[in-house]
Amino acid sequence: MNKNTKLNKGIFFVIEGIDGAGKSTQIKMLADWLTASGYDVVVTREPTDESVYGRTIRAGMYGERSTPEEELDLFILDRKEHIRNLIAPALKQKKIVICDRYYFSNIAYQGAAGLDTGDIRRLNEAFSVIPDAVFYLRISVDEGLHRIQNIRNSELTSFEKADFLHKVKEIFDAMADEYFHRIDASVGAKEVSEQVVEIVKEMLYR
Ligand code: TYD
């Protein structure tokens, strides 16, 4: 095991997918693999727990929905603070940042809620750091919901209703940037992790 592997620049990974795709498990597995390989890793998530906007979003998730426009504003304000306070500084320090959801969720979820996906993308790309790789954990809506109910055994949030998630998935499925990697997440966690690590290795060692 090599310790303190130095990078000459920061690397920014994003994990995306519908609810129940297994993001948390995969983030942990990727972070553990990177740490064991000697890299300095920061794991973070959106909506954040740090900004007043992120906390407002999380507090509202189980209740009445605000309008898609209000949601978009909150997610964007939260993301601006997140980039300024955490993501950009960590990348400057040449760390590897792994973010659980980013503006691709904004495009997919607020797009599914009726906003124009092109507009959401443009608004975000005007200020956001573009990731080096996005891992989209692809799973069916039925499987995703099944996993949430099994794991969490709790009520669904307003973002987790089946019809809505079908639209979210459709939008994720249509994304095609060259840094956007579609991963089959219907298989076991270990197999999914191997697919992710394979791509990461190629990026680190090329
Ligand atoms: P999630 O990662 O599911 O949080 P947790 O697993 O801790 O409950 O994120 C919360 C919800 O926020 C999720 O259903 C997707 C939604 N979301 C958006 O609608 N737009 C966004 O821009 C982001 C980042 C998340």
Image (tube, grey):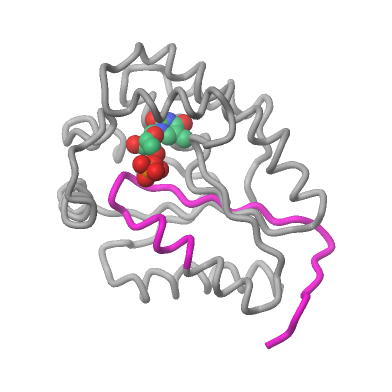
Which residue is found at the position 30% from the left and 45% from the top?
Answer: 19
The picture quadrant where one finds residue 117 is top left
Quadrant of the image for the C terminus? bottom right
Name the foreground residue: 8 vs 45. 45
Q: Position of residue 199 (x, y in %)?
A: 55, 68
Q: Is residue 53 visible?
A: yes
Is 5 included in the stretch rendered in magenta?
A: yes
Note whether 104 is above or below 92 in the view shown.
above
Q: Is residue 140 visible?
A: no
Is 179 included in the stretch rendered in magenta?
A: no
Which residue is found at the position 48% from the left and 55% from the top?
Answer: 135
Which residue is found at the position 55% from the left and 72% from the top?
Answer: 32
Name the foreground residue: 20 vs 140. 20
Which residue is found at the position 32% from the left and 61% from the top?
Answer: 185
Residue 206 lies left or right of residue 141; in this view the side is: right
Start and end of the magenta stretch? 1-28
Quadrant of the image for the N terminus? bottom right
Q: Position of residue 69 (x, y in %)?
A: 43, 12
Residue 67 lies left or right of residue 76; in this view the side is: left
Q: Position of residue 38 (x, y in %)?
A: 70, 76
